[in-house]
Amino acid sequence: MTVRGSETTAWLSSATLVATIATAGSLWFSLGLGLDPCDLCWYQRILMYPLVVVLGVATVENRPAVSRTALPLAGLGLCLSAYHSYLQATTDQCAFGGPCATVQWRMPVLDLTIPNLSFVAFGLLAVLLVGMWMRVKQ
């Protein structure tokens, strides 16, 4: 394996790890803590869950071109989680009809809500995918 190949594997492995932790975290909130996901949470899950498999397979096969598939999912998730975080910070009603503006859980140390954590995860994925793509293009 070349240096470039091992670099790509490191970028893909990191992205897979982020997606896996985000997926496990969302499952812990609903199954472990018994929190009901709102409509926007479901949409974010729909965008995050497949990334575990897509990025995992791309890591095993060392396919940096996966960024063309994964980046639109991460970008859309980033936008949704930003909107969700905005709703929680500014209003108590949601246009989707669900309890999307309700804060069900807050991280004790950093004061982050679940949509904030989703925003961080999608942001990390976007940075990793763009970074990998730029390194491969050199």
Image: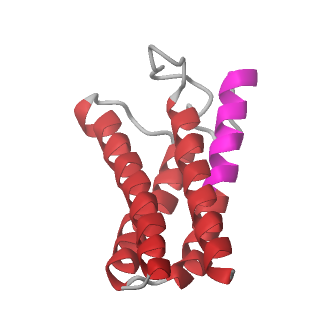
Residue at 42%, 56% in the rendered image = 19
Give the image location of residue 138, x and y in percent. Answer: 69, 80
Q: Quadrant of residue 99?
A: top right
From which residue to which does the magenta span run? 77-92
| Residue lying at the far left of the rendered structure | 32
In the visual, does 95 lie left or right of 55? right
Which color scheme did the rendering employ for the protein? secondary structure
21 over 85 or under it: above or below: below
| Residue lying at the far top of the rendered structure | 108
Residue 91 drawn in magenta: yes
In the visual, does 135 lie left or right of 111? right
In the visual, does 30 lie left or right of 104? left
Give the image location of residue 127, x and y in percent. Answer: 63, 57
Give the image location of residue 109, x and y in percent. Answer: 46, 15
- The answer, for residue 91, to whether it is visible in the render is no
Q: Quadrant of residue 102?
A: top right
Magenta stretch, main secondary structure class? helix
Residue at 31%, 79% in the rendered image = 60
Residue at 63%, 73% in the rendered image = 135
Give the image location of residue 80, x and y in percent. Answer: 65, 49
The residue nearer to you, when weighing 135 against 57, is 135
The residue nearer to you, when weighing 134 against 15, is 134
- The answer, for residue 107, to whether it is visible in the render is yes
In the visual, does 116 lie left or right of 1? right
Residue at 34%, 34% in the rendered image = 29
